[in-house]
Image (tube, rainbow, N blue to C red):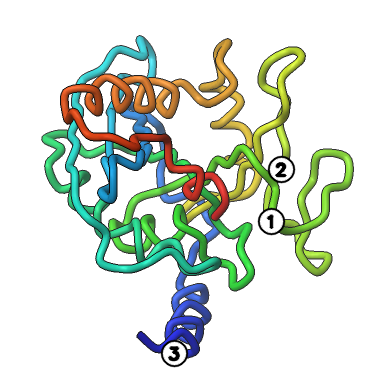
Amino acid sequence: MDIIKLKEEQLKLAKKISLEDGFSEINLIAGADQIMVGDSILSVIVVLDAESLKIVDAAHVVQKPKFKYIPGLLAYRESPIMVEAFSKLRRRPDLLFVKGNGILHPRGIGLASHVGLLLDVPTIGVAKKLVLGKEEQEALYIDDKLVGFSLMTREHAKPIYISPGHLISLDSAREVTERFCIGQKMPEPLHIAHRMGAKLKRPLNQEGIEDSGISQKE
């Protein structure tokens, strides 16, 4: 594992990220959540009808990551498992919410951006914690470059931090997230994916099961 080369690769990949909308309308909206199950990762993706918000498709996989956790390189650990889960879907979503960051990343390519690039699908990164950047009146900046927004999605709750992943503009990332936050802190596709993941992990009957906080950071 050559960390320097991987960081150089990220810089090259970041140049391929598009901040232009890669969709004309959203009919199917999806959410991807990853949960630690022992030393494995459970990746869950749900696809909802954008109007009714009813589940129309879902897929999950449980795999041991082949890459250890290294700050800033989370995508190399988690994206292969998420991509595998996505490949099991029967219906391709128009946009995918990813629990993690998009361009809100030291080299401009967090988990949501990396996955969007691999799948060629519009993505939005949603995180519960801000571990990088500066916040000014809900706008998030890295070196004076606008990279996302903080959103108060529920009264008395802490904000979430969103950033475009791939094939979506900054303004659209904010508008789409606000559209699908309907009472829960997280956008509905992510809320449902997390809830489904919580149910799926119980029968796995392993000790030390907990939600992957790592996914919230990058």
In this view, the residue in front, 33 or 153, is 33
Q: Quadrant of the N terminus?
A: bottom left
Residue type at mark 1 is: Val
Occupied quadrant, residue 174: top right
Q: Name the side, left or right, on which 124 lies relative to 148.
A: left
**In the rendering, at what x and y percent does residue 135 appear?**
83, 48
> Can you say whether 166 is above or below 61 in the image?
below
Q: CA distance from mark 2 to mark 3?
A: 30 Å
Q: Quadrant of the C terminus?
A: bottom right
For image coordinates 37% across by 37% down, the residue present is: 33
Between tags 2 and 3, which lies in front? 3
Residue type at mark 3 is: Lys
Q: CA distance from mark 1 to mark 3?
A: 24 Å
For image coordinates 76% across by 64% down, the residue present is: 142
Circle 3 residue: 5
In this view, the residue in front, 117 or 110, is 110
Circle 2 residue: 149
